[in-house]
Image (cartoon, coloured by chain):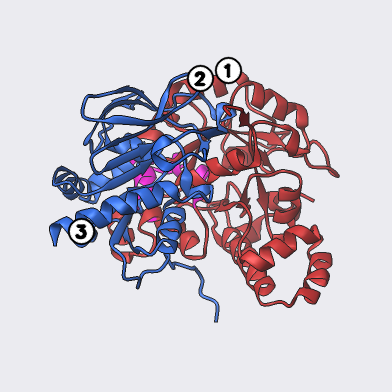
Chain colours: A blue, B red
C-alpha cells in the first residue's frame, strides 16, 4: 500500500540530538533528509509546542516574508526567539539567514525577523532569478576543499557586527556565510547540493550544547 | 575558483524548491500583487486577465503588456512569474529580457504552435509547464521545464480536474516504482516519454522537479486537499481576486497550504470568507473550451 503522501523526515528514531526544522514553507524536507542521514532525530517545527524538545533548529530556504507571517500567526516566533536568546544552536540558509539576522535591508513593510545574529543582511541582493548562480566557495572553517554553493535569489551579509565573524566571501568580497557562537547563516543552500559539511559543523555545535547542558 | 554559472539546471530547479509549501497567486495589477505579497504568497503570476475572464471574454489570449509585468516586478519583493503561449519562444525571449523569475508556458493562453513546445534549455530564466499526466510532465522536463504544475481546468473554480491530474501523475509514479527494469522500457513507450527520465522516476519514486498543482483551486480546503494528494504547493488563479474578500481568502489559503494536514486550522481559516468565485462546472464546458487539452 502506497500512502498518498510520504511524510518521512529522515531518521526520526535516531539516537542523535533532536533537531527541529522550521517547516512553515520552503525546502525543509531537504534539510530534514540531510540531518537524518547524519544521525539526528528530526522534528518538523510548525507550532509552539514543537519548539520545546529540540536541541537545535534549522531554518530552511524559502520566502522569508511567508515564514515571518506564519511564524507569528501560529505563535512559534516568540518561543524561538526565547530559545535563540538562551543559546540554542541555529543554522539558517538563505531565508533562514534573513530570519536570524539582527538587521534586514530590502524587507517588505511590517516584516520582522527572529534576530540573534549581529549582522546586516540584504534580501535579494543579486537581483532576479536570472542572476541566481552556483560557484565554488572557500570556507576555511570547513577544510581545504571548496564548498559548491548554490545561490537562489539569495541575500548577502552587508556588514558583520563585532559579535559575528565571516566564514566565507565571494571573490568580490561580499560575505555569504557567517557564524556567531551557536548561530550559523549562509546565503546559499548546502541542503540541495549533497555537501554535508555545513550540517555536520552545525550538528557539532548542537552536540556540544547538549553535552554542556547535561 | 570563483567561476560561477547562471541558468544551470540546479539553479533553475532550485528556485522551485524554495517555493515549496507555498501559494502562487495570479495578479493583474500592482495593487493585487501587493495584496498577494502581504497575504503570504510565495510568488505572483503577472497577467492581464485571470483565466476566468479569458474564458468569459474569449478571443486570442497572449503574453501580457511588458509595462504591466514591470510594474508588478517593481511592486513586490517575491518572485514574479509571467505566461508565454505554448510554443511562442519569442514571447519567452521577451519575458526573459524583462527579468521575470519564472516563465509559465501556459495552456491558459492561446497556443502559438500546435506541434512544438518551446525548447526551454536555451533560456537562463526557468520554465514551469502544465501537465495532465506523467508522460506529459516528462516530455516538458525533457524540453527543459524546471517545474511542473498539474493543469486542472483554469478559470472554473471547479477543483475536480486538478484532483484528476494530480492523482493521475502520482498514481503513474507509484506504478513505475513497483516495476522491474524490463517493464520500464514498455512504460516509457506507453507514457510517450524519454526512457532515461522514466527510469529516473522509477528509481527515485518522484519527479526530478518540483510538482505544484493548479486549475480550479478556490478555497482553503481545496488547497489542503491538493497538498494531501502530494502536491508540493498550489497555484491559485481566478480563485482569489474573483472572490468576495481577496485579502482574507488569500491569507486563509496560505495557512491551509502550510497546515494542510490539520483540519482544525483549515476549519478556522475557512470561517467567514464571504463568497468564493462563482465557478463553472467542468462538465458544462464544451470540449473546445477545455484548456487542459492544450499541450502535446
x then y, percent, for residue A29: 44, 56
x then y, percent, for residue A28: 41, 53
Asked if disc 2 and disc 1 are in contact, CB closer than 8 Å, the reply is yes
Marks counted in the figure total: 3
Q: Quadrant of the C terminus of chain A?
A: bottom left
Kindly tell me whether residue A26 is visible in this rendering.
no
Q: CA distance from mark 3 to mark 1?
A: 55 Å
Q: What's the residue at 44%, 24% (across, down)?
A: A125
x then y, percent, for residue B149: 60, 51
In the image, residue B240 lies in the stretch drawn in magenta: yes
Q: Circle 3 sits on which residue?
A: A210
Q: CA distance from mark 2 to mark 3?
A: 50 Å
Q: Secondary structure at mark 1?
A: helix
Chain hosting mark 2: B
Q: Circle 1 sits on which residue?
A: B67
Left or right placement of residue B272 versus residue A83 in this view: right
Q: Which residues are magenta?
A: B233-256
Instruction: Using the rendered image, report if marks 3 and 1 lie on a common chain.
Output: no
In the image, residue B177 lies in the stretch drawn in magenta: no
Mainly helix, strand or loop, the magenta region? Answer: helix
Of residues A138 and B150, the one nearer the viewer is A138
x then y, percent, for residue B99: 59, 24
Q: Secondary structure at mark 2?
A: helix
Amino acid at each position: 500500500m502506497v500512502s498518498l503522501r510520504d511524510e518521512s523526515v529522515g531518521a526520526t528514531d535516531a539516537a542523535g540530538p533532536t533537531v527541529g526544522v522550521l517547516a512553515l514553507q520552503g525546502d525543509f524536507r531537504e534539510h530534514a533528509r540531510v540531518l537524518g542521514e547524519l544521525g539526528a532525530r528530526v522534528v518538523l517545527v510548525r507550532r509552539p509546542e514543537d519548539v520545546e524538545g529540540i536541541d537545535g533548529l534549522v531554518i530552511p530556504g524559502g520566502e522569508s516574508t511567508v515564514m515571518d507571517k506564519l511564524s507569528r500567526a501560529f505563535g512559534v516566533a516568540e518561543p524561538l526567539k526565547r530559545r535563540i536568546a538562551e543559546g540554542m544552536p541555529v543554522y539558517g540558509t538563505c531565508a533562514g539567514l534573513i530570519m536570524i539576522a539582527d538587521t534586514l535591508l530590502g524587507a517588505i513593510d511590517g516584516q520582522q525577523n527572529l534576530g540573534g545574529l549581529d549582522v546586516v543582511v540584504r534580501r535579494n541582493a543579486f537581483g532576479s532569478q536570472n542572476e541566481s548562480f552556483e560557484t565554488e566557495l572557500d570556507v576555511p572553517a570547513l577544510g581545504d576543499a571548496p564548498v559548491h554553493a548554490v545561490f537562489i535569489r539569495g541575500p548577502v551579509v552587508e556588514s558583520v557586527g563585532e559579535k559575528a565573524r565571516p566564514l566565507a566571501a565571494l571573490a568580490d568580497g561580499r560575505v555569504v556565510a557567517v557564524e556567531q557562537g551557536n548561530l550559523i547563516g549562509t546565503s546559499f543552500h548546502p541542503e540541495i547540493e549533497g555537501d554535508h559539511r555545513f550540517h555536520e559543523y552545525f550538528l557539532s555545535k548542537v552536540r556540544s550544547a547538549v553535552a554542556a547542558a547535561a | 575558483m570563483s567561476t560561477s554559472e547562471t541558468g544551470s539546471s540546479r539553479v533553475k530547479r532550485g528556485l522551485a524548491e524554495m517555493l515549496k509549501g507555498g501559494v502562487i497567486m495570479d495578479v493583474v495589477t500592482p495593487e493585487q500583487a501587493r495584496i498577494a505579497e502581504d497575504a503570504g504568497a510565495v510568488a505572483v503570476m503577472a497577467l492581464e486577465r485571470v483565466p476566468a475572464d479569458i474564458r468569459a471574454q474569449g478571443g486570442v489570449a497572449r503574453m501580457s503588456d511588458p509595462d504591466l509585468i514591470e510594474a508588478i516586478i517593481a511592486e513586490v519583493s517575491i518572485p514574479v512569474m509571467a505566461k508565454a503561449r505554448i510554443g511562442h519562444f519569442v514571447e519567452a525571449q521577451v519575458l526573459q529580457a524583462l527579468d521575470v523569475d519564472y516563465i509559465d508556458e501556459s495552456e491558459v493562453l492561446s497556443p502559438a504552435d500546435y506541434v512544438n513546445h518551446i525548447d526551454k534549455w536555451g533560456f537562463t530564466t526557468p520554465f514551469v509547464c502544465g501537465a495532465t499526466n506523467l508522460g506529459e510532465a516528462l516530455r516538458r522536463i525533457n524540453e527543459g521545464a524546471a517545474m511542473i504544475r498539474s493543469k486542472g481546468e483554469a478559470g472554473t473554480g471547479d477543483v475536480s480536474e486538478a484532483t484528476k491530474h494530480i492523482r493521475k501523475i502520482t498514481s503513474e509514479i507509484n506504478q513505475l516504482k513497483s516495476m522491474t527494469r524490463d517493464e520500464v522500457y514498455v512504460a516509457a513507450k506507453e507514457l510517450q516519454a524519454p526512457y532515461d527520465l522514466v527510469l529516473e522516476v522509477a528509481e527515485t519514486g518522484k519527479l526530478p522537479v518540483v510538482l505544484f498543482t493548479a486549475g480550479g483551486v478556490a478555497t482553503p480546503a481545496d488547497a489542503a486537499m491538493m497538498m494531501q494528494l502530494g502536491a508540493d504547493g498550489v497555484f491559485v488563479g481566478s480563485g482569489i481576486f474573483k472572490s468576495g474578500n481577496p485579502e482574507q481568502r488569500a491569507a486563509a489559503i496560505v495557512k491551509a497550504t502550510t497546515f494542510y494536514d490539520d483540519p482544525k486550522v483549515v476549519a478556522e481559516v475557512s470561517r467567514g470568507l464571504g463568497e468564493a468565485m462563482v465557478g463553472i462546472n467542468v462538465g458544462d464546458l464544451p470540449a473546445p473550451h477545455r484548456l487542459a487539452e492544450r499541450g502535446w
